[in-house]
Image: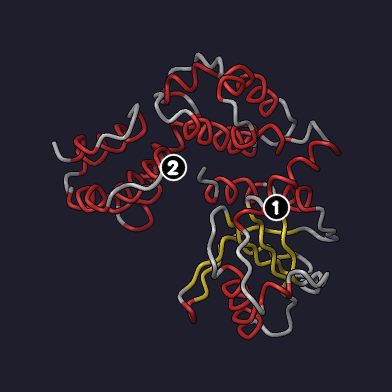
Amino acid sequence: MKTDKQLFKIFTNVPEFFFDLTGIDYQTNYTFKSETIKEISRSMDGLIEPDDLTKPHYIVEFQMQKKDDIYGRIIIEMASLGLKKQGLLYHGVIVFADKSVNVQSEPWSSLFESNNPAFQIFYLDKLLNALEEINPEHPLIFVFQPYLRKDKIELERVASKYYNKIQECGLPENVINSLCDVFVSWMMICFEKLSYKEVLKMMSLTTPLEETVAYKELVAIGEKKGEEIGEKKGIRESIINVLEVRFGNISSEVIDRINQFNDLQKLKKLHRKAIQLKEMDDTVFFA
């Protein structure tokens, strides 16, 4: 299951959740952000920066699939930022989906097995199980239900229960909306053959599709990007983003075709179509 974008959204809204999940001790407020190191043309999954600059900065990589360069990559990121911003303390953290995707690569992987707090690895499945034992009412446990539950029949049965728990968790409204959106996006991935409307119905949501927070956020992506880098280009990128979130990797032919559209109204229609598709249908973009 695709998780990178959802994890980024969770921890950007509530950086403290990262520490709740990993158990890493922290003594100041932190901000979770994306960071691109221009010198090596590389973006990391997350940089967690402290308000107190004497505390560690955490470079985070979420590894959900096997990649044999993950250890070398994070070492390069740590070294590059350390040289760029000398005097700051950088720690590296790799969060693997589970042990099966941890591909050892010496000598770098040995650093992360040395009990040095500057180099740490975690396994998401174990972290979530441990957190649930310690605090079964933690909002992360509710949000991650589509990720944790392999039985789709059972997931369908309990989806509305956990969605409601997210809404009632007592966090600020904007955070609750973001967590609900992550939950819905994971549900869409789990039930890829269902339409957006059908997934909402599964969670006992009777709100019209166009009035849901998740729908409004997806529709707003194009407008927001449009303000920043040009409306048409922004909507094109948003269409591709929505398709990837809902259906995983999409063909280069479809991406090329989307990038060829230049009519603004046509792009807006395709954007809504991408959200409403019941299943991936390439022909929609070649009609």
Q: Quadrant of residue 103?
A: bottom right
Q: Amino acid at mark 2?
A: Val
Q: Position of residue 259 (x, y in %)?
A: 22, 52
Measuring 49% from the left and 81% from the top, which residue is drawn there? 39
Vertical relation: 4 (above or below) 163: below
Left or right of 11: which side holds 66?
Answer: left
Vertical relation: 82 (above or below) 18: below
Measuring 72% from the left and 69% from the top, which residue is drawn there? 57
Measuring 70% from the left and 52% from the top, which residue is drawn there? 123
Q: Position of residue 214 (x, y in %)?
A: 49, 32
Vertical relation: 186 (above or below) 52: above
Left or right of 18: which side holds 275?
Answer: left
Q: How many marks?
A: 2
Q: Quadrant of residue 287?
A: top left
The residue under label 1 is 123
Vertical relation: 165 (above or below) 266: above
Q: What colour scheme governs how the chains and residues are painted in the rendered image of this protein?
A: secondary structure
Residue neighbourhood size for the residue with mark 2, other residues' Cα within 10 Å, grouped as few (<14), some (14–19), many (≥20): some
Residue occupying the far left of the picture:
287
Residue neighbourhood size for the residue with mark 1, other residues' Cα within 10 Å, grouped as few (<14), some (14–19), many (≥20): many
Mark 2 vs 1: CB contact within 8 A: no
The residue under label 2 is 245
Q: Amino acid at mark 1?
A: Tyr
State the SS at label 2.
helix
Q: Position of residue 184 (x, y in %)?
A: 53, 31
Q: Nearer the viewer, residue 195 or 87?
A: 195
Left or right of 160: which side holds 23?
Answer: right
State the SS at label 1.
strand
Q: Position of residue 247 (x, y in %)?
A: 39, 39
